[in-house]
Image (cartoon, rainbow, N blue to C red):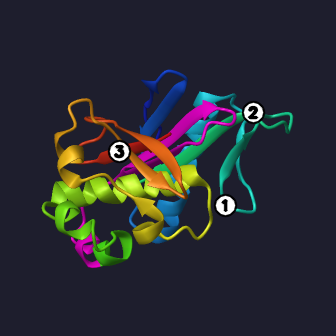
Amino acid sequence: MSSRHDIVRIDASPGITVWHTAIASSSDRSGRREAEREAVAGLVAAAFVPEARLMHKESGAPYILTGDGCDTLHSVSISHCSDTAMLAVAPEGTAIGIDCEHFRKALRNVAPRVLSANEMPGWTASDTLLLRAWTIKEAVYKAAGIPGLPLAEGIRLPQAEIADNAISDIIAATADGRRFRLIFLPDIAPSTTIAVAL
């Protein structure tokens, strides 16, 4: 069932690397989950050592163990969408979150649960902005590391016009009183929006 795909490394920012690969297609849900696990395992092996394993803390946050059972002393974040798996790696102690998404009409239905009343008008003005808002909130949620942090009221986005016109594609969002810098990775996978929160 598994097919080998190229793994690509991107230096997203000084000290921050993002690894990505395609996910093998599968016709059923269990096959899909297995393909996602295999893709992520391949990313972990490429970023660290072949024996490295993805583990999860009680909070659900991922971390990496090397073959000898030692923590790699890196911060990591994982995301996958329909056809792409991603691994973001930062130095230990650096908060990091990554999210990759394709636009789905269902995002319009969940927008009121994800965006605050103040954010709704600007960030729902286009499918592109809504998708960007979703990926920002998900990436910041992961970087904040606070289980149960409410997306709508717990993570604040900048004005939508700023994000839509950001020349450098770098903007900031806040969560729990902390400011997170966002980097968008364009043209990695077709029709995919990718945000990295630091």
Q: CA distance from mark 2 to mark 1?
A: 17 Å
Q: Amino acid at mark 1?
A: Gly
> Which residue lies under the disc numbered 3?
194
Residue 113 position within the rendered picture, expressed as x and y whole percent measured from the top left: 37, 76
Please give the name of the residue rendered at 43% of the width and 31% of the height, measured from the top-left corner: 6
Label 1, secondary structure: give it: loop
Residue farthest to the front, as pictured: 177
Please give the name of the residue rendered at 66% of the width and 61% of the height, measured from the top-left corner: 60
- Tell whether position 105 is magenta: yes
Q: CA distance from mark 3 to mark 1?
A: 21 Å
CB under 8 Å between callouts 2 and 1? Answer: no
The residue lying toward the viewer, choosing from 10 and 84, is 10
Q: Amino acid at mark 2?
A: Thr
> Which of the 4 image quarters holds residue 52?
top right
> Which residue lies under the disc numbered 2?
72
Q: Amino acid at mark 3?
A: Ile
Q: Which residues are magenta?
A: 83-109
Please give the name of the residue rendered at 22% of the width and 37% of the height, measured from the top-left corner: 166
Label 2, secondary structure: give it: loop
Q: Which mark is residue 60?
A: 1
The residue lying toward the viewer, choosing from 170 and 17, is 170
Please give the name of the residue rendered at 45% of the width and 25% of the height, measured from the top-left corner: 13
Marked residue nearer the N-terminal end (3 or 1): 1
In the displayed structure, does residue 42 sit left or right of residue 29? right
Residue 82 visible in this rendered orientation of the protein: no
The local crowd at label 3, few if under 14, some if 14 to 19, many if 20 or more residues have their Cα within 10 Å, is: many
> Which of the 4 image quarters holds residue 188?
top left
In the displayed structure, does residue 118 sit left or right of residue 35? left
